[in-house]
């Protein structure tokens, strides 16, 4: 689950596929599989949009699979985005914003003090802020690694329900 351009892991992997079937048919196939009692996945698709999650083994890092099905000439485009639940993703974005803004403010204060010939000891907080942001990225990456098998399960479920690979 790394991007094709580099070896860094993608925190929110995407899938995209063209399928030669109507969007309503794809949606009906997925909903039929989701309605089965034995289905390992819960969720619902409606009007070309839906969110899927695993039924069991839910934890903090458990992924959510957002699907979009759009009509295209002669078929459908199925796009998906895997990632943590919205609450977890929002928490990480908030932490990135607060830490990044705080580090930027400290940097500006330190550079202003430096240009005025005053003490620049506050600049020692900049590497600390960058280290905390890097640590937060590592935590998110580790969470994604822990949930990789669940992401594969969601993807395999969708592929078997649709009858077409999504990668």
Image: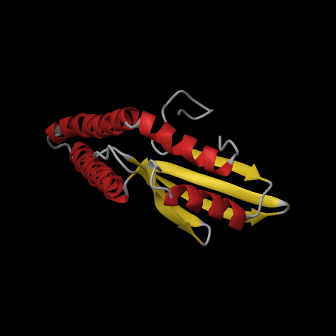
Q: Quadrant of residue 32?
A: bottom right
Residue 10 appears in the figure: no
Q: Position of residue 36 (x, y in %)?
A: 50, 56
Q: Quadrant of residue 121?
A: top left
Viewed as shown, does residue 68 lie left or right of 43?
right
Residue 143 appears in the figure: yes
Q: Position of residue 133 (x, y in %)?
A: 30, 40
- Front residue of this view, candidates 73 and 20: 20
- Give me the residue at 56% from left, 40% from top: 156
- Front residue of this view, candidates 138 and 43: 43
Viewed as shown, does residue 99 lie left or right of 67?
left
- Give me the residue at 58% from left, 48% from top: 158
Task: Give the residue furthest to the bottom.
Answer: 47
Quadrant of the snapshot with the C terminus: top right
Total residue callouts = 0
Viewed as shown, does residue 87 lie left or right of 110?
right
Q: Position of residue 106 (x, y in %)?
A: 23, 48
Color style of the picture: secondary structure
């Amino acid at each position: 689950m790394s991007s094709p351009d580099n070896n860094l892991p993608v925190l929110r992997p995407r899938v995209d596929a063209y399928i030669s079937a109507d969007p309503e048919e794809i949606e009906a196939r997925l909903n039929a599989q989701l309605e089965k009692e034995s289905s390992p996945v819960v969720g619902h698709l409606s009007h070309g949009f839906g969110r899927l999650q695993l039924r069991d083994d839910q934890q903090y890092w458990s992924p959510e699979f957002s699907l979009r099905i759009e009509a295209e000439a002669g078929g459908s485009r199925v796009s998906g985005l895997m990632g943590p639940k919205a609450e977890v993703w929002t928490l990480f974005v908030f932490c990135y914003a607060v830490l990044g803004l705080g580090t930027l403010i400290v940097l500006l204060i330190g550079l202003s003090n430096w240009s005025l010939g005053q003490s620049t000891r506050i600049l020692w907080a900049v590497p600390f802020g960058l280290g905390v942001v890097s640590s937060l990225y590592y935590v998110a990456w580790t969470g994604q690694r822990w949930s990789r098998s669940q992401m594969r399960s969601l993807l395999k479920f969708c592929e078997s329900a649709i009858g077409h690979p999504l990668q």
